[in-house]
Amino acid sequence: MTAERFVKKPRTLTDLRADLAAGRTKATDLAAAYYERIEKLNPRLNIFLSLTKERALAQAARIDAIAAKGDPLPPLAGIPVGIKDVLVTQGAPSTAGSKILQGYRPPYDCTAVARLEAAGAVLLGKTNCDEFAMGSSNENSAYGPVRNPVDPERVPGGSSGGSAAAVASNLAVATLGTDTGGSIRQPASFCGVVGVLPTYGRVSRYGLIAFASSLDRIGPLASNVRDAATMLGVIAGHDPSDATSSPAPVPDYAAESDTPAAGLRIGVPAEYFGEGLDPEVRAAVEKGIAALEVAGCTIKPISLPHTKYAVPTYYLVATAEASANLARFDGVRYGYRSPNSATLSDMYSHSRDEGFGAEVKRRIFLGTYALSAGYYDAYYLKAQQVRRILADEFLRAFAEVDAIVTPTSPFPAFKLGEKTGDPLAMYLADIYTVTASLAGICGVSVPCGATKAGLPVGMQVLARHFGEGTAFRVARAVEAAGI
Ligand code: GLN
């Protein structure tokens, strides 16, 4: 494998901050070094879709000025970050991985991005992703696939593949991704980094180009659990611009992640260890569970019997919402407009036909069908009912355990092109991640060993609504075991 040239662990936030505060590093030099690395590796890995150099260097200069005066540095001072291209950035390309938004420069910043910058982070650029975040391999990007830094012949996972690969190859210290059915957790597991699915409502979605609004969440990816917890602390919290954001106070997640996991009750659901699970992934996750026991956790077998219905339920809810959300891309207000139209109605249909890729169209068809008058009760309504059952099942489980651990994905990173011919196989691979998405609960994917071929395995740690601190404690124990 050619991995070594691409895989590199970023320095931790704590170390970088200490260096900046002591004057050993300058934010401007750090940003310049990251751009140099991006210029070298991006042509091979296709991680960044666009760079925001001027903005980054201006911010870095501001941080250097603060450091030079000896004033206290904000929590993410000088930290180079990458942002998934579904999050809008003022005046900078924000394509959502789609041709239909080529050339679109939004007039405002996504709240999560604004919060990172207010905390001192340096925005390097926008990361590649599946078109409108629809996919599990990054092969649905209109701008070409991202390659996995661990093995460039393999996918990085998706849809936040660029954000995961950026951290794995140290083209950014941390990144933001979005997760609707697994899009932070699964690429984190494929690339060997930490990815966080915050509780629904924990992080404002203002400025997120919507895929499925009852499922979409923004969360961080980082090289270690503590950095991910620090990032979440910065972006979490109520935002008057997003009515779905929660007013619940934001705890000190980094401090919570420092608390040992001893005494926590960990549920292991049988349904996540059955047919279709790669034996090497199973073995790695079982080692992770054994490490938790050594760390003083109590392991409890549990059952989540409706898990088998999660994939069809997710693909009905997500596509139904997508079909409504994507109606706004009509060639009129922004983005691509087909030049080949004689009438207004032609203009709509040609713009959409030429602007959207195959997977996005498939989802719009599926979703429109599920919502249509004759089928609404049979599909969409039924899916909503099953969703409730799945959520209740988790709530019952969390009466008995503090966290639930599972594999993040049934298999490690697969080869580019291996699954593109079979959309159903691609959908079925989301089996372990879509359940938490439907239930609104939170989770973390943490690296948990590797296969014999060196492909990273991720363990998913789920916790109840607003239980991020607990998920971080468990993930930290797995990380510390160094499996
Ligand atoms: N792979 C899932 C899908 O294709 C999840 C995507 C996501 O979380 N954005 O819908």
Image: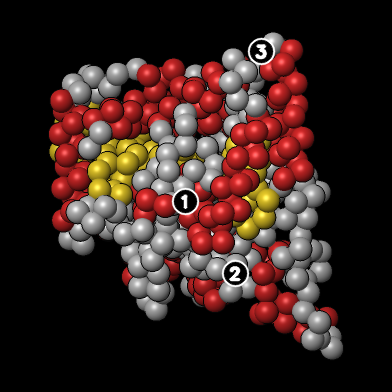
Residue 425 in percent (x, y) is at 33, 70
The three-letter code of the residue at mark 3 reads Pro
Mark whose residue sits in front, 2 or 3: 3
SS label for mark 1:
helix
Q: Which quadrant, please, contains the N terminus?
A: bottom left
- Residue at the farthest bottom position: 342
Q: Amino acid at mark 1?
A: Ala
Instruction: State the mark number for residue 72.
Output: 3
Closer to us: mark 1 or mark 2? 1
Residue 345 appears left or right of 130 = right
Q: Earlier in the sequence, mark 2 or mark 3?
A: 3
Residue 144: give x, y in percent of width and height: 55, 68
CA gap, disc 3 and disc 1? 32 Å
Q: Residue at image x 52%, y 37%?
A: 173
* C-alpha gap between disc 2 and disc 3: 43 Å
Residue found 75% across the figure and 26% down from its top: 62
Asked whether residue 218 is in view, the answer is no
Residue located beneath label 2 in the image: 142
The x, y position of residue 185, in whole percent, is: 41, 47
The residue beneath circle 1 is 165
